[in-house]
Amino acid sequence: MGEEIESVFESFSPVDYRFKVKDLKNYFSENSFVSHKAMVEGALAKVKAKRGLISKDSADRISAAAMDVKAHEVYAEEENTHHDIIAQNNVTKRRLNKVDHPAVHVPLTSYDKVDTANVLRYKGAVNNVIIPDMKSLVNTWIDVTRKEKDTPQIGRTHLQHAEPITFGFANALYLDRFGGRMMKIKEAAEDLRGKISGAVGAYNAQSLFVDDPEEFEVEVLGELGLKPGRISSQIMQQEPVTDLAHYMISGFCVLANYSEDVRHLQMPELGEIGQPRGPDISRSSTMPHKANPSGAENTISLWKVAMPFMNTMYLDEISDFQRDLTNSASQRFLPSVMDVFDYSVRRTNRIAKNLKSHPENMKKNLNMSADKVIAEPLHIILSSYGHPNSHEYVGKLADQSYITGKPLTEIVLNDVSLEPYLKKFTPKQIEVIHDPKKYLGIASKKAEKVADYWDNVLKKI
Amino acid sequence: MGEEIESVFESFSPVDYRFKVKDLKNYFSENSFVSHKAMVEGALAKVKAKRGLISKDSADRISAAAMDVKAHEVYAEEENTHHDIIAQNNVTKRRLNKVDHPAVHVPLTSYDKVDTANVLRYKGAVNNVIIPDMKSLVNTWIDVTRKEKDTPQIGRTHLQHAEPITFGFANALYLDRFGGRMMKIKEAAEDLRGKISGAVGAYNAQSLFVDDPEEFEVEVLGELGLKPGRISSQIMQQEPVTDLAHYMISGFCVLANYSEDVRHLQMPELGEIGQPRGPDISRSSTMPHKANPSGAENTISLWKVAMPFMNTMYLDEISDFQRDLTNSASQRFLPSVMDVFDYSVRRTNRIAKNLKSHPENMKKNLNMSADKVIAEPLHIILSSYGHPNSHEYVGKLADQSYITGKPLTEIVLNDVSLEPYLKKFTPKQIEVIHDPKKYLGIASKKAEKVADYWDNVLKKI
Amino acid sequence: MGEEIESVFESFSPVDYRFKVKDLKNYFSENSFVSHKAMVEGALAKVKAKRGLISKDSADRISAAAMDVKAHEVYAEEENTHHDIIAQNNVTKRRLNKVDHPAVHVPLTSYDKVDTANVLRYKGAVNNVIIPDMKSLVNTWIDVTRKEKDTPQIGRTHLQHAEPITFGFANALYLDRFGGRMMKIKEAAEDLRGKISGAVGAYNAQSLFVDDPEEFEVEVLGELGLKPGRISSQIMQQEPVTDLAHYMISGFCVLANYSEDVRHLQMPELGEIGQPRGPDISRSSTMPHKANPSGAENTISLWKVAMPFMNTMYLDEISDFQRDLTNSASQRFLPSVMDVFDYSVRRTNRIAKNLKSHPENMKKNLNMSADKVIAEPLHIILSSYGHPNSHEYVGKLADQSYITGKPLTEIVLNDVSLEPYLKKFTPKQIEVIHDPKKYLGIASKKAEKVADYWDNVLKKI
Amino acid sequence: MGEEIESVFESFSPVDYRFKVKDLKNYFSENSFVSHKAMVEGALAKVKAKRGLISKDSADRISAAAMDVKAHEVYAEEENTHHDIIAQNNVTKRRLNKVDHPAVHVPLTSYDKVDTANVLRYKGAVNNVIIPDMKSLVNTWIDVTRKEKDTPQIGRTHLQHAEPITFGFANALYLDRFGGRMMKIKEAAEDLRGKISGAVGAYNAQSLFVDDPEEFEVEVLGELGLKPGRISSQIMQQEPVTDLAHYMISGFCVLANYSEDVRHLQMPELGEIGQPRGPDISRSSTMPHKANPSGAENTISLWKVAMPFMNTMYLDEISDFQRDLTNSASQRFLPSVMDVFDYSVRRTNRIAKNLKSHPENMKKNLNMSADKVIAEPLHIILSSYGHPNSHEYVGKLADQSYITGKPLTEIVLNDVSLEPYLKKFTPKQIEVIHDPKKYLGIASKKAEKVADYWDNVLKKI
């Protein structure tokens, strides 16, 4: 069978025809999987040579032969073997003289290669592509947070106007949440473990082959920059990969949350931010005037696909006895999930970078509720001067304002029963009552603090 | 940009490099999506011609131009338009003279095409590939049910020996459950609806274009063998597609359940069935003797991927106002889910066809518990003759048998207190007590009945 | 052990202390589960009496004793038996003379009772509480649809202004989607099946007991208004219950979607609807002025709990051989899911009933985009008069309007190249260009049609 | 409204009538939620007194009044307020003189209390109940691992016989995986953060109240043994709670996996372990002889309910702007999930403690495949002596053994082509070929190492 070459548009999965991050090809394509398994073969040969079990030349030949193999050859051979690793061994051997054959694969079991290769791929993808992409987004958000730390905006809870914040403060929360996930992903990738412990994890074959199988495992994995776990079965413990997936999905939730805010803030009635025409804003095929925040919507949509995959991850923690194969096909889908996460990190970064805030609209919206917003500070100050039921009382005045249409400030200042308290108000307290844009708490300072914190972290990692 | 052509092993998704059902290419590739959208364009042109809005020649030219377009051109153009449907319109128009341009797409909105094209694809895939594949599996299971309807096997609950059945009876349950899902999938595909109702579902543009927009919609969809729904927004109601997905996932659960039994029955300690070496049985790369039921395991593994996707489907039922775009990327993944389902139907069919039962081992296992199994019929018969606490009493005798190692039958026949009841036993009742393989209820008859039922159904559909 | 009586606020599950629909107690409490199992006992006794296997008096005594049992007694007895059904049998027998003991439970297996009782409970809850509640909401939505069928509102896609609709039209889509789910839930409840087929589904015990076990099953289930399935194992096929759950979850998605729109339309910047102070609008404990749409938020929150439970349902379709017990505890949670669905139906109904539309704000918002909205009809009409690239051209004019701040209408009417086309416009077409509130398509008519359709349906069911 | 007191069997949720861990009542009942919110009130009062804002006496009165409140009073009051925290404040105030009223709750927002109270509850439940329960199970598994470290058992992959291990080694894997999850749960609970940052997280009200709101937050939380996060909105960042839930769900997967093995090893054909009659082994109501491993099945069943709840957790990471309320009802379900996890930890512990291994059956099963099992070591040794295609060649001999029925050992020893290699075999290698029970790798040593590791950990935490 020759190699099957065709248009990417013959693909079924949108990962392959639409959402592929090409920088991840070296880690996530099936060809890359084959070559990472070859790297394990190479590491094995190298350690054998170091231990004098084979010659250095033989090790070099085996390593070179292994790395030369392409997926399409393995698949052709698998038609005969019905086993992918035996197939890959066979096509590797074809490139070698008989004298080198006995050293190929022995004393490994398939999953010594598969699990170790996958750990290599995931660490490579995370450290070389995904974390750099995340850092870049964190950096963008640091910039936005600093730039907008003093831009007043109405804080919203329940989609209703609550109390004022600044746009930079709102952004700082995304920065901090996403930064936190980034650190966890980094740590989870570091916690991944390889294995060279054989068919049932007890180093049966390895024990026949060398006297110190645990040390042998440490050496082979060491060649690849990896470490073994404390104990394994035929496969590595599934939990560390599950943790990595969890932190990625959880980070994806932060992106989706941000995207929700991005599309809400662009509602024409709010108009608090804008995005330039381009790949993240689409038109309509029938409404020539429309500017749709499709980039943000796309992130949410891909999150909807990735998120439930955690159930697959949890299901794969369960494996009968020393392992069943029911996690094999399913774990092959994990790279697609990582891909759409990384795709969305990049897209969110582009959106965050290009976003324009519209401070005048923020001010306009804040002013809509300016008069009502003072209800909270009023209640707080009144109670601090001993008003016995300030919450209820101010609530009543707010209702009165709603019914009569009179400004709440006016009603308050004319309320006789409040007079004794109002007299005690400090100038700063008076100011807040008259201009809720002053009622910002420590929004600006907090935004700055969070930005500085992450700036420092970025410098160190 | 030229067409991107590359090895399928550069794919990230296992759907594309490993589990693709090639017969589904006409429905599930991105090229097929483009061509199905072109079919909607063609249907639109045809109806316009019938109504005298454009000439028949123009309609033919538009239809031909539309069908000529390939996905790679659309994607190249999308780089400029940032909108897939506008891009497809543009590359269609390039094949036409200006005189035909105004008739392209107008008065449609993008999702008049997208949703209608998807319904066409799903119905095509279901009716032409998936249902035929399911029928073939149903047929295989009818054969197995009939062939094995009299083969005694111990029925198992809690993985413990319960009471005897026949292997055909066990199979008949899968036949019936899966047949039921097949009928529901057929019905759900029939219930899918297209739409030509415009950007917000109110036929705004269509109303300007024709006086009878609902009739116009009926005609355009009619050209494609489809019907409209009762009401839509920019998109068709999501529920009918969700139902289709539900029945497929639920059918996938039946396959997974069958696969669990298949791999359990092949445990060396049970040995009740066997599979021939081949694509559904794999070896080990280090244990040359092993025969692993990897086909059945593969089905379970793919089910683990497909099943949680229902959450994505449910999430996509929620769309702000007249629609948001957060179901766009996610719904592009549905064909991959349908593909792995169909792949697993085919694989399960091959497994079921090649399965060999080992009646001698079934008999051996049944005999292991033969003596204990009589506890139920004994209790039932005793109580029918008025024994006041037969369940408890027989339970005690069973415990006694367990402790002493004496056969339960022997203990029972020597129990003085049971004598008055035992005397009343009919010959058939005595027979059951002595040979639990006779204690089969109506397993054989039921198996036959179920097989006949589905045989009849297959003839009609 | 005496009965454990305590405050409901000692409960852990919010279903029990906060979201319980009391009308469902007869179906969903543990006491009701016990009494429904007793009903199966009663039906069994009745059929035995009819067949002359026991006396009518005995049947009456057994039935009365069974119905007298309370859950707390069963649980106390289960401490000894470690089996809930044996425990229930024992406490039933304690109320009877020894002469009646042999007839209790025999020849059933536990799940003949459990599955049949659950079907009874689910059908009862659906037919007597949930469907009536759904009908009531459908009815409310019919009213709103009719009342608001002519109230213009801007249609929104991507949260952006698209083209005009009416508020009644928007409502009609929820009405139709939810009505559709209601019909499916009704049908799915009707499709539930009971079973009296014994420990492995082959009627082993029943065959010893009667000569016509299938007919016997039909009779016992018939006493309860139920029918058997085509074939079962120890348990009924799981698929019909899964279907019922699916339609309920899918209906819950419709409620969640509606709730999203409800809370969006109340954003202060939109203000298109309002809700009165009361149980569905909450205040803030620190911001006395706030009115939060917490009722709608609550529905979405409960949907988040219920929706992923479908995965549990799918997992429960898989059961080893003639059944394992891993669906036992999990299926006990299904009533909680049905409860929160029904709770949300009622709450949504109250919200929908009390909702006030604010047509003046709808008009204000629509007018915001009035000038832009004409881009679509303009493009459609131009293309119908043969303009070769009206979509692109109108898009350019819209951009020009955006940049210069000049109204699009003005730009269009002054555009020399458009003059030849504009001259052909009919008066109705001219009107639409000048007042997009006229550009409503058939929104009003469609709303009416859908309302009429469901009004008719309600009359029939 | 008086307190609603009723039988727990009027509950709908099995958490409340069947699976409740009573030791968790102080953390997970609704009454406990109310009292934990009261603790926040108390801490607030204490800090105010320390700062001289109120008298120490007043603080004591407020604290005492707050702690005296019961849920049923709050619920009665909520009928009027439609807000749970305002209701709780009101009933607290009723116990106080007017002079103390202004100090109640001010300057908090509801979620300063709710989120902080929940963190307190989760930390309390984890540290005082769940971790001790997990430690106890870890301890049991240490014992089993040590006791069974030398008991030979066939290792199984794909449910087929692979290579030998020891029963203690198999157990050590569960020990290590579960121990790992325990450490992560401990760490995640430690990472939970409280908040006193006000309605939008910017300390707006707090800033009016004190000059150092961040320090004030540190003090109030400090009274409760908690720390603040880096930044919050109205609510704490959801991620730390999501992490805690993740590790619990992942630990639940380990329990489910163990339970799968427990029920498989008790299949009558395997018989490698047994459980005593009691609460984890149930009978059948119709088959008096049966012993069902229902305890293990119950754990799997509860896992099926808990696992998909992670989707709810992920959905709750998304909250509009400074928060919407759609995580409120849903997060109320988290304690139920934690409860069924802890319930299953306890149950698994009881099962693991009572489990009896049947070494003679393990030996019998191992011997079934003894002859075949040597295929792997043979292939490894042959290749180490330079055999060019030992895997394929031994595979052929294994097939020959299968066809002819001759033992593989016999075939091997008579194979002329193997003679040159066999001559080189060391005595230890010869021994393995003749007795695969010697082919245990380092199973025993590894089991011991893992047991020692966790023994040490338990001593430290």
Image (cartoon, coloured by chain):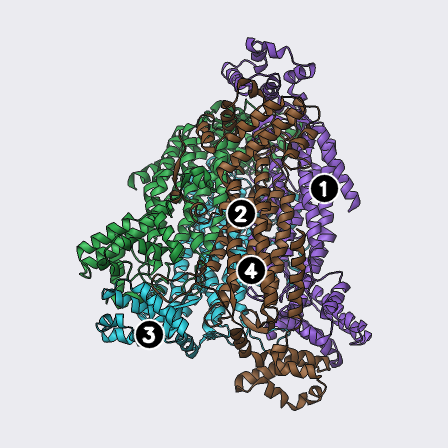
Chain colours: A brown, B green, C cyan, D purple
Q: Nearer the viewer, residue C234 or D15?
A: D15
How busy is the neighbourhood of tag 3: few (under 14 within 10 Å), some, or many (20 plus)?
A: some
Image position, residue A120 (x, y; %): 59, 39
Q: Amino acid at mark 3?
A: Ile
Q: Is residue A310 above or below residue A274?
A: above
Image position, residue B165 (x, y; %): 48, 32
**First along the sequence among labels 1 and 4:** 1
Nearest to viewer (mark 1 / mark 4):
4
Do marks 1 and 2 share a subunit? no
SS at badge 3? helix
In the displayed structure image, the side of residue B43 where residue D138 appears, left or right: right
Circle number at residue D138: 1
Do marks 3 and 4 share a subunit? no
Mark 2 — residue? A338
Nearest to viewer (mark 1 / mark 2):
2
Circle number at residue A451: none
- Find the distance from the CA under tag 3 to the CA under tag 4: 43 Å
Mark 4 — residue? D318
Mark 3 — residue? C411
